[in-house]
Image: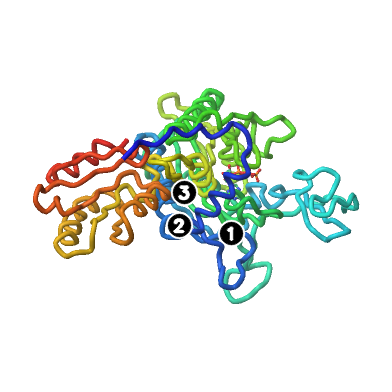
Amino acid sequence: MSSPTPTAAAPAEPDPARAEAIVNLAKRRGFVFPSAEIYGGFRSTYDYGPLGVLMLRNVKDAWWRAIVQRRHDVVGLDAAILSSPRIWEASGHLANFTDPMVDCRSCKERWRADQIGDRCPACGSRDLTEARAFNLMFKTFVGPVEDEASVAYFRPETAQGMFVNFANVLQTARKRPPFGIAQVGKSFRNEITPGNFVFRTREFEQMELEYFVPPEEAPRWHEYWVAERYRWYVGLGIDPAHLRLRPHGAEELSHYSAATTDIEYLFPWGWGELEGIANRTDYDLKAHAAASGTRLEYFDQATDTRYVPYVIEPAAGATRAMMAFLLDAYAEDEVGGERRSLLRLDARLAPYTVAVLPLSRKEPLVALATELLEPLQDRWMCDYDDTQSIGRRYRRQDEIGTSLCVTVDFTSLEDHAVTLRDRDTTAQVRIPIAELVAAVEERLP
Ligand code: ATP
């Protein structure tokens, strides 16, 4: 088998065809389905299919490993999604978490005023209403009575869970600034114009860290976290040519922020935010302390001083990051004169690390294949496929990003060896079954 002809690196300019290829692949191979598709879909919501759920979990696990597991200064939290209006009143979200909305009087479409010029993007009319503030929080009622006293909100960010638990965590985790609280979970925003596949949805997953520091150290930690987070994306395979850092101008800063830098990715339609790293100052802890009457500060025994820490917040989207990883990994090349499309995903993100492929469905082969599958499954997510020709099975595994394929053939029954094939190079080597786990391990990051 010949090795693939090298593919040109993805261009450092917007590439709409790439979006189409990924949306199509996501549906066809089971990464992402339109939600309630049998009923015609439901308002830009999406469901994660058998492969999407694996990959999204890998994205979140990779974040958790970097932010929580491999550090001793960050602890985790999983706060409630359904939350008290008092949280959002104190945080400023009830008053400020709004987008400016305009209506087109001609075609009745609604838009975010800051995302369009003076014309309706749908019909071109200039007859737009004045912009009015639209609060993005989803409101619901807790209990059987739908009145003001039973109002609750679906959290629009995970961050507030960390602030309202600050005292609880400080007491139980025995940490002192600089230290962080991390959380991964769903957030909800009633976006006026969701779109671009899973880039902007009303229900999405966030990965947020609130890192509490002595106030005078905040600028230094802000820089530190911008660099750390940039490295995370590059370390998991995003081409640096498709990433840029964008500090916010003064007029753009959120109501709580002293400085924010976005990590942006070159999406097929242009640059878009992957993650924002904000210096939230002591805004949130002070606001919650004032509203709740609970002290939210750190008492430094060494210096006998009390202070309210500043917070540096790297806030990333898991679903948006997954989309960027997919887009960046997508490639097409030629193997033995045949075109193939593949996902050059880092093995830590790929849905399947290994696929086991018995050459035929004949019993002795299937028995051997299922036997060697077991120790692999103990360690990694594995696919098993005994349908169609081996060439087509390789193509399928390449297209879903499986890092390695193990082929079991009739000779395997005699020489107790299998073929290990690499996705990117398509190179194949014969490996004794007894050494298979070690051989796979050796090839993973
Ligand atoms: P935007 O300006 O695009 O609305 P934002 O600046 O309000 O986003 P943040 O509040 O900083 O976003 O949220 C942190 C991260 O959460 C974003 O960088 C993004 O990855 C993710 N995120 C925010 N809103 C959405 C959404 N509607 N759908 C998917 N991911 C989102």
**Which quarter of the image is occupied by the N terminus?**
top left
User: Disc 3 marks which amino acid?
Assistant: Val
Using a 10 Å C-alpha cutoff, classify the residue at mark 3 as few (fewer than 14 neighbours), some (14 to 19) or many (20 or more): many
Q: In this view, does 126 lie above or below 43?
A: above
Q: Is residue 261 above or below residue 33?
A: above
Using a 10 Å C-alpha cutoff, classify the residue at mark 1 as few (fewer than 14 neighbours), some (14 to 19) or many (20 or more): many
Q: Which residue is drawn at 59% across and 60% down?
A: 45
**Camera-nearest label, 1 or 3:** 3
User: Disc 2 marks which amino acid?
Assistant: Arg
Disc 1 secondary structure class: strand
Classify residue 125 as left or right of residue 379: right
**Camera-nearest label, 3 or 2:** 2
**Which quarter of the image is occupied by the C terminus?**
top left
In this view of the protein, which residue sits in the foreground, 93 or 333? 333
Q: Which mark is residue 184?
A: 3
Residue bearing mark 2 = 29
Q: How far apart are marks 1 and 3 (CA)?
A: 15 Å
User: Disc 1 marks which amino acid?
Assistant: Phe
Classify residue 26 as left or right of residue 133: left
Q: Which mark is residue 154?
A: 1
Disc 2 secondary structure class: helix
Q: Earlier in the sequence, mark 1 or mark 3?
A: 1
Name the spot of residue 110 as percent of width and height, x first: 78, 56
Name the spot of residue 111 as percent of width and height, x first: 77, 52
User: Would you say residue 52 is visible in this rendering?
Assistant: yes
Name the spot of residue 316 as percent of width and height, x first: 53, 42
Classify residue 12 as left or right of residue 55: right
Q: Residue at x 47, y 56 (%)?
A: 31
Q: How far apart are marks 2 and 1 (CA)?
A: 32 Å
Classify residue 53 as left or right of residue 258: left
In this view of the protein, which residue sits in the foreground, 233 or 439? 439
